[in-house]
Image (cartoon, rainbow, N blue to C red):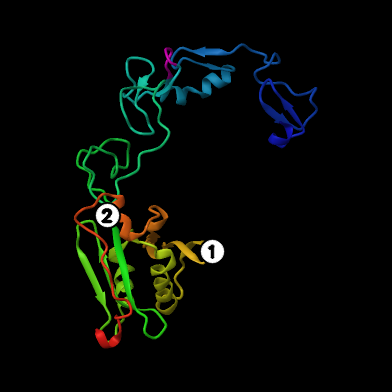
């Protein structure tokens, strides 16, 4: 314990580390205490001496200890149930529950990808619940199609969708590449806070954004998480963009063509794209 406390000596009685001679150390909770502890009838807590009692008045006016369950409560907090042991869980915001048996290990996650359909605290700065939640995290799903006739993959079309099934199509024409069009839109200020998702993007799609950044935004700082040469996540925080590119394959490790069987989808299936037929002559 002395090493843990980074001190020469350690007192088990008061759980304190110290460097002076151990014969001179007097524990605050030990027999060396000169006066008896003073009980405060206002907040139901003990003070070590008269000076402590005087100084604690400011705290006493704000909080107190429940004599029934020993919980420290705020005087302006009216959520404490009249029955001791029952109250509001500040982790998951459930009210009037038995805190002794309430098993709450993880905090609630704010709604993603759509508007919340239940009473929640997503868009509230406090712990109070909002009946009409309007919070939503913007998700965009995208996919690349590229020409390979020259031996180099050149994007010819990028298609993106959101949760409302709005489709955005970016194709190469008039000298502007599909890649440049897509990222000019994807990295605009109008798309702040958006998370872009593509399946197996760590091995393919995300490399096109690296190409775009090096060509058009060389001074922009970005963060990446790699697994070897695979880009698991790319994030741009500069300018308050807070834009992410992630790979859905990190969460669902199956082929895109297996999605209908995995999720029992009967109305959709992955189509086939003639990659070798995708040449400039066949556009």
Q: Position of residue 278 (x, y in %)?
A: 29, 80
Closer to the chain start, of discs 1 and 2, is 1
The structure residue drawn at horizontal position 29% and vertical position 86%, both measured from the top left corner, is 280
Residue position marked by numbered label 2 in the rendering: 260
User: Which image quadrant for residue 92?
Assistant: top left
Q: Position of residue 178 (x, y in %)?
A: 30, 77
In the depicted structure, whether residue 102 falls above or below residue 197: above
In the depicted structure, whether residue 102 falls above or below residue 224: above
User: Which image quadrant for residue 248?
Assistant: bottom left
> Circle 1 — which element?
loop
- Within 10 Å of the Cα at label 1, are there few (<14), some (14-19), or many (20+) other Cα atoms? few
Residue position marked by numbered label 1 in the rendering: 228
Residue bounds of the magenta highlight:
65-69
The structure residue drawn at horizontal position 29% and vertical position 42%, both measured from the top left corner, is 124
In three-dimensional space, the C-alpha distance between marks 1 and 2, rounded to whole angstroms, equals 30 Å
Mark 1, mark 2: which one is toward the viewer?
A: 2
């Amino acid at each position: 314990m002395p090493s843990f406390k980074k001190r020469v000596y350690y007192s088990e009685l008061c759980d304190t580390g110290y460097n002076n001679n151990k014969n001179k150390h007097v524990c605050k909770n030990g027999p060396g205490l000169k006066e008896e502890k003073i009980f405060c009838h206002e907040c139901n807590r003990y003070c070590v001496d008269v000076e402590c009692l005087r100084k604690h008045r400011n705290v006493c006016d704000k909080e107190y200890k429940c004599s029934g369950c020993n919980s420290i409560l705020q005087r302006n907090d009216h959520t404490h149930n009249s029955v001791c042991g029952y109250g509001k869980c500040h982790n998951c915001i459930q009210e009037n529950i038995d805190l002794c048996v309430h098993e709450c290990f993880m905090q609630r996650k704010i709604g993603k990808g759509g508007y919340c359909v239940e009473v929640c605290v997503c868009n509230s700065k406090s712990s109070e619940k909002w009946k009409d939640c309007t919070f939503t995290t913007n998700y965009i799903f995208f996919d690349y199609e590229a020409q390979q006739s020259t031996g180099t993959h050149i994007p010819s079309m990028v298609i993106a969708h959101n949760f409302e099934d709005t489709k955005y199509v970016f194709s190469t024409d008039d000298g502007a590449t599909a890649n440049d069009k897509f990222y000019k839109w994807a990295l605009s200020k109008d798309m702040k806070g958006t998370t872009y998702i593509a399946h197996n993007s760590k091995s393919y799609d995300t490399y096109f954004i690296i190409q775009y950044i090096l060509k058009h935004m060389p001074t922009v700082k970005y963060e990446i998480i790699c697994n070897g040469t695979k880009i698991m996540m790319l994030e741009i925080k500069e300018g308050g963009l807070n834009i992410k590119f992630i790979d859905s394959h990190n969460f669902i490790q199956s082929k895109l063509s297996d999605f209908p069987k995995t999720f029992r989808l009967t109305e959709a299936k992955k189509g086939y794209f003639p990659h070798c037929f995708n040449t400039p002559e066949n556009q």
